[in-house]
Every structure is written in C-alpha cells, then in structure tokens.
Amino acid sequence: MRERYNELRRMSWELPQGKQKIMVMEKMIRIADLYMTEEDAYQTRISYLTAASEAGASEKMIIAFAWCLAKFEGNPGKYSYHELLWYYKWILGAIWKIPEIRLEQIESLFEHFKVMSEQYGYNLRAYYHKQVNYTLSIGNFDAAAKAYKLWRTIPRDGLADCKACEQNLFGIYMFRIDYIKRGMQAMKPILEGKLRCGSIPENTYSQVLLPLLKLGKYEQASKIANKAYHMIKGPEYLSEHGKFLLFFTVTSPTKAKKVYNETIEFALDSKVGWDRLEYFLCARFFLTEWHKKKRKIQLVAGDQVTLAWLDQEIQRISQAFNYRNGNDYIHLFIAQHYKNIQEIKDAYPE
Amino acid sequence: MNNMNFQVNLQGIIDLLSNHLYSDPGVFIRELLQNGIDAITGRKRLGHTFEGQIKVELFTSTPRRMSFSDNGLGLTQTDIELFLARIGSSIKKENLDTSDDFIGHFGVGILSCFVISEEIVLITRSAVSEEGLEWRGRPDGTYSLKTLTKKVPIGTTVYLSAKPEYEEYFEYYQVSNLLNKYGEYLPTPIVLSEDNYNMNINESSPPWLMSKKEAMEYVERTDYSTPIDIIPLHSHLGGVTGIAHILPYAVSLQDEKKHRVYLKNMLLSDKMSNILPSWAFFVNSIINTTSLKPTASREGFQENDLFHAVCDELGVCIKRYLIELVDKDMDLFQQIIRIHYVSLKTMAVEDDALYELFIRHLKFETSYGDMKMDDILKDHTTILVTASLDEFRQIARVAKAQELMVINGGYVHDLDLVRNLTQVEPHITVEVLDILKFSNRFEELDNEDHALTQPFLKYASHLLEKFQCQPLVRWFEPSEIPVMYNTNQEVNFFRLTEESEKVANPLFSDIVLVIKDELYEKPYAKLCFNYNNVMVRKAMESSDLTLQKASIELFYTQALLLGNHPMGPEELRLMNDSLLHFMNRGFENANGALQ
C-alpha cells in the first residue's frame, strides 16, 4: 500500500490546485489511516490543509484540522506547535464563512486559539488580526475597529502573517470601512513592488480594482486588471474572480464572459457560503448586463445558473447568515454592493 | 530642531554590497566589462573618433595581479570624488531616461572587486583633461587620490591583486572563461593578454542575429542536442531580439527554466526562469534586450509593467509561430505535439485561439484506448468525461462494451480541455460523468426477473449498509464481469469526517458534525450486479442464505480489490471469511462425494 500511496502522491504533485488534487489526497489519507503510521496520516493531512485551501474547500480543511488538533493535544511533543497554530489561524480565517456554524462555536474557537497562542509563547497579534475579518463579516464594526487597533499595536511575532499579507489586509480593512484613499495608501508599497510574497500582489490587484474605479482612476485600474487577471487561477481565488468579473462587466464584456466561463464552476462546487455569496453577487451583475443584448453564445452552466436561480441562492445564503448572526447585516452588505456597482458604472468613462 | 544625517558604517556597507549582493565572485569581470563599455560609449558621445578596446592583462606575480583597461571617457578628479568615492552614485545616473546606451547605473559595481581583491588601484585620464590620476580604494572605506606626473593615455585601467583564497580568479583559463561568458557578444573588441600572448575574446556573432540554419548549428554546438526548430523572438516594447529553440525531448512542468538573457549584448543571466510565459516550458531561449531594467545585483530584471508586457509579447511570438506552422509544415507541428503535448495542453487551456488550433491534435485516454480528439469526434457526438483517473478505471472496460465514449479527465488539464470542447464544436455534447449514476445507463430487467432478484438485493442492501454501499442489478456487457463497484470520491472524504469525528475535541466535534451533516449528503457507493453473469445468477437463484451471504461479501470485497480501493479491517475480515466459507464448502462437497 505504501507504493499505492507514493503513486497517488506523485499524481497529486502533478495536478493543479483544485478538486481533483484534493480527491487524490483524500485517498492518500485513507490509505495512511488504514495501513501507515499516525505520523504519516498527520503529515498527509497537513499537506491536505494547503491543498484544500487552494481548492477553495475550507470546510474540508476544518475536518482535517480537527483530527490534527486532536492528535496534537493527545501528544503535544510529537508535532510542531508552530505549524499547528499557523494552520489554526487559517481555520479562524475560514470558519465564519460557513453560515451553518454557529457564533458561539466560532467564538469558542477564537478563545481556544487565544489560550493556545499564549500557552506556546506567542502574542495576540494574529488573534486580533483574525478577529478583524470575523467581526467585520457579522457587521460588528466597533469590535472590528478595536481589534484592528490592537492588531496594529502588538508587535509582530512568529505567528504573524508575512509583512506583505498584513499590509494587504490593512488596505482591505480600510476599503471595508469605506476609507478608499487610506486603503490605497496602505496598498501603495505593494503596488510599487516593495512588498511581495506567494499571494501578494495577486490578491492586492483584485482588491484595488474597484476602489480605483471609484476614485476615477480608470487607466490605472485597467492596467492592473489586464496584467493581473492572467495571474489569478484556480478555485482558491473565488472572491478575487468575482471582483475581476465585476470590473470587466463594466469595462470589457468579452473578458467578463471569459472570466465567468472559467470560474462559474468553482462557485458551483464551493460549499462555503461567504465565498459563494461574494461571487454570486458579481455573477448576478454580469448576467444582468449580459442579457441586455441578444446573445447566441451559450455560457458555461447556462442551464443551471439563471438570474432567477442566482437571486434564489443569494437570498438563501443571506438568510442563513442573518439567522446565524442574529442581525440583518448581510442585507446592508448587499445594499452596499449594489451601491458600489452604481458608483463604478457612474465613474467609468464610456 | 536640527536636521541631522544618518551615520553609515562604510566597512559594513562595502561588505554587504561586495559579499552579499552578488551570487558569484566572478561577477567582478562583468562589472568591470560593463564600466569599460559604458566609458567607451561615453567617449564616443563626445564626438571622439577612435577604435574602442578593452584589454585585460594577467601578471604571474605573487600575489597574482590583473589589469583591466579601456580607452573610454576616463575620470576627472571631480568625477572620482562625486562618483567613484561615493557609493550609490553613478556617472551614468544623471540622465537616466536618455542614457539608454549605458549598461549600468547603480554606482555599486566597482565594489564587487573587493570580493577578490584587497585593494583597487585605478589609473585614469579623462578625455577632457590632460592630467593622469591614481585612486587607491580599500575595503575599510578609505581611499587616496594623487595626480600623476607621468603622462597616461585617455581611459581607465583598474589594477587588482588577488586575495589568497581567490587566486584562481586570476588564472588565465578562469578569466578567459568569464570574459567569454559575459562579453562574448559585446561589440567592443576585448583582448586577454598574458606573457605577451594575446587572445581576442569576442569574435563571434550573437545567436539572435543568426539565420535559422546557423542558430540550429549554434544550439547543437552549445547544448549537444539538435533542436526541433528555431522560433524568432521580438519585442518592440522591450527592444528584444532573440531565439527560442524547441527542445527535442519532453520536459516536466516543474523543471526550472534556464533562459539565457543578455542586456545590450552582455550576459545578464544564464538561468532566468520567468522571461517567457510559464506555459512555454518546451523551449529554451537566448535573448538580448536594450530596454529592460536590471536589478542592482544585475542577475535579473526589475519585474515592472514593462517586464510583464515583454513576457506577454514574447509569448505571442511563440503562439504565432505555432499557428503559422499548421499551414506551413504539418509534420513538424505533429512532431512538436508528440513530444510536448503536456506543454501544449497547458497552452490550450490558457488561450482560446490555441485551443481551437490544438484540440483536434491532442491525445486522450478513452474507453477505446488512447485516441486523438480528431478521431474521437469522427465517430462520437456524445462524450462523457470522468473527473478522476479512479473513476475512469472503474468504468472504462464496461463503458467500451456499452459503446460509450468516455474520456479520462484525471490527467492534468484533460477535464478542462474536454469540457471546453462545446465552445468550438457546438454540435458535440459533453457530459461530466456522474459515476454513481453510471449504472443507470444499463438495461433494466423485465418485471419477472426484477421480482426474482428483489430478495437477493434486499439482503445485499442489509449486508452492505454499514459500508455505505447500495446494491442494484442490471443487465450489461461484458458478461464475464460479475459486479461493478462505483464510488465517487466523496466517499473518501466521508471516511475522513468519520475519523475526525472519532477523535476531535469537544470544540471541533460539533463543527465536524455540522459540516458532515449539513454541508454534505451521506455518499453511497453503488454495487451493480450483472444479470448477464452466470455466477451472479447462480447466487441470486440460490436458496441457501449462508451461501448468498458469502457470495455478496466476496463480490463486494473482490470489487474493492480490483478497483484498488483501500479496504478497512472489517472489509478485510469479510473477504477472508467469505473465501474460507467457500473453501470449506468445497472440501465438504469433495469429502461427501468421496464418502
């Protein structure tokens, strides 16, 4: 069975990030669980965490992490605590995106992570960083502002994201609270090429497109979009694909069609409510504009994804979030999205 | 408030720049060559008529020494104070936008000499001055400057004396290799001299100016393999001319690319990986640019907008070549596809025009064997594609017997390539195969047979429930296959959730349950019994329940084994028990017959 495992591992290395790759890895985990050592099963799951995240399957990442955490807690000296806490951070970045998971469950995880971070000698910078995105997502802007302040005050340590990622998130935070110019200021060192990492500037490019359009900097936005949309591939970037789709819907319908055809399947495969919602909102705008003209070209998944279907999905997911959050913030979030679209359309020089 | 200046630890800065900026001590040759060439360019700009030359002379003294001379612009005392003795200043920086004839401009190049030499001595006379100057720089940051009484020719000579551990960089073979490496294609003559023996370094013409035939021969000489063809490369934006030679052997997507890149005819890097798009991994290139900006270490380019635009433009050259090749030389095109199909598949996924060009020529694994898409489309307008190799293996043999065209989408890009087929062949129907519904395509039994098989199925359903496996019965070819076991990959994920559920701490166990129950449906595998198989019929018709049980368990575990599915302890036990049961029966019967 070791041979079969190795054969699957070779195959997984060759496959691009996505569904096929994680399926192969799930089989590897099964083999490791049945016929190999606990360490093998642990390390295979650790590799699977990245693959699942790259495939946009956060829920699968959580499942594998739960097992790793249990094994770690059973024998803390056996596995790296830094590695485990690092992935725990990923879990906190993903858990609130699933509306089926209750707030008290999410908050218990945050609390647990906080205790573990301190227990293993880290400060709470990473904790507050993750709090910002979570509290923003449930519309608790006061808590987000407090967490943001603490995140920036506490010094960086071994658990903090890399400088480029953090800088990018500073910018995103500003955009989320509608401080566009300050957000652009935060993104400046990244756009100038002074800060970069594995996922930056790719992520930054998608984040600044719409703010730039809002600021009337069409030329710059267009330049970034044309350069960047080749760089972002695969299901991991569902939210980014949505932003490009929205941008090109306004600026270049042909490119928008290409982005849509390449990415709609990722959204249909996703089980993560937040990612689907963000993408579907952009897809809805694209389809509305697309059908304003008579089109002969059939879109990918055209039979399933109609405007009516999208409205139903958006409605279903937002209700699930509002129910979970105990407020109607998602309605405000969607209203803000439509307002943004209007501003962008107004700013675009036709 | 007083404005104050930072204090700089000069020795530290020199150490940093000279020992850590560059990856190879040999780069001092490149830096000196570059300064020499730029000085000659500068002097020509003044309108002087002269034959530019760079001369490198080696002395077999102890320690070993070397001189590096050019007959270029030279330096005045002010130049020396402003530029040579001030790190980060460059004489070539003043008109950065207009001074595009120069190769360097960071003002740190000369420091690379401190890696191999204890001291730098520079004798110079400016083209606009009569006096000769001697500058001595030391790695502790101190220097001395004096005016020479003796008359020296216009130009600059740098004297270096080897640190004991770097003597080899002063050996003839080493210096000639380095001069050749960096300066082979520079337009200014370079002469290397030792003991009155002179050798001209740069007499050959660069590959980017060669005819196709010459370039083929050149690559053969340097790479020891004959390329399939040469693709000319041009980028107007980046002032690039070059060649890409198509490798005669397959390369992996993961192999690091090593393109040879020259900046204004001087070698910048012979292992640059990203100057061509990532899909172009079937070619190696040699290119020369006049416009891209190097990084401070001069081992790569600044990856700015221009760089990305150039990369795209070079990609277009390769695409255009392939498009034209289809009309010009179909045999060559086919040969390229045969060797580099992985690369071409990657290209086809990226680019609609290339997709249309390639798709009919690409090979896929199908239920009828390996076939070109062109041949697939001759006989089939409906195509099924599996999402994984495993799924393909489960049904390939049976699919052929049903005359179904199923393509294995499990290899890199194949699923996307097949799925996009309808965009260029609208009359074709492509369906991603739902493996669990595959057996629904088989012939259903008539009412009478259906009724007969029900008790057996009910029993099988009861026995296999704990393995999340649902039985059904159909009539299908080939008759020698008794059962077909189909599982989609969610089954493995479901097992994963079960494992997590068993061990997770209380915080996570609830969350695991939510994901398992609310985000996913419980997946069932299907075990389809073939009513066309004699053994299956016998098992169904048997009235012996223990025999039926053993048959069902053996059919199930045998199917797992054949499909390479991992078996849990319970499934292994089933297999053993059922086999032993049949052995026992066999012996009992044999003994009974004897008695």
Image: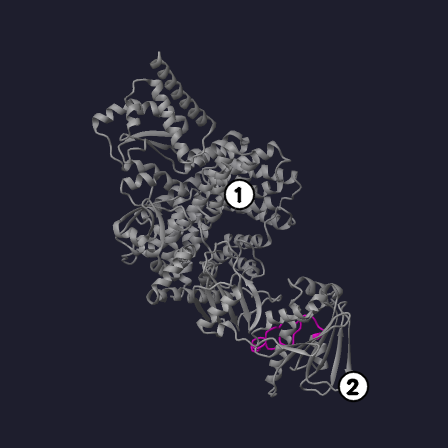
Residue B462 visible at all: no
The amino acid marked with disc number 2 is Thr
Residue furthest out toward the top: B595
Residue located at (59% from left, 52% from top): A162
Query: Residue A344 at what x, y percent from top left?
Result: 42, 59
Q: Residues within 10 Å of mark 1 (few under 14, many from 20)?
A: few
Residue nearer the viewer, A40 or B94: A40
Q: Chain of mark 1?
A: A
Residue located at (27% from left, 38% from top): B441
Residue at which label 1 appears: A47
Q: Is residue B144 magenta?
A: no
- Give residue B149's mark: 2
Q: Chain of mark 2?
A: B
Mark 2 and mark 1 in contact? Answer it, CB < 8 Å: no
Predominant secondary structure, magenta span: loop
Q: Secondary structure at mark 1?
A: helix
Q: Secondary structure at mark 2?
A: loop
Query: Residue A329 at what x, y percent from top left?
Result: 46, 45
Residue located at (40% from left, 50% from top): A281
Query: Residue B587 at what x, y percent from top left?
Result: 38, 18
Tell me the mark number nearer the camera, choosing from 2 and 1: 2
Residue furthest out toward the front: B594
* Left or right: B364 as drawn, with respect to B207: left
The amino acid marked with disc number 1 is Ser
The relative height of residue A75 versus residue A92 in the rendered view (above or below) is above
Residue nearer the viewer, A53 or B333: B333
Residue B213 placement: quadrant = bottom left
* Left or right: B379 as drawn, with respect to B49: left
Q: Which residues are magenta?
A: B84-108
What colouring method underlies this structural image?
one colour
The relative height of residue B477 versus residue B40 in the rendered view (above or below) is above
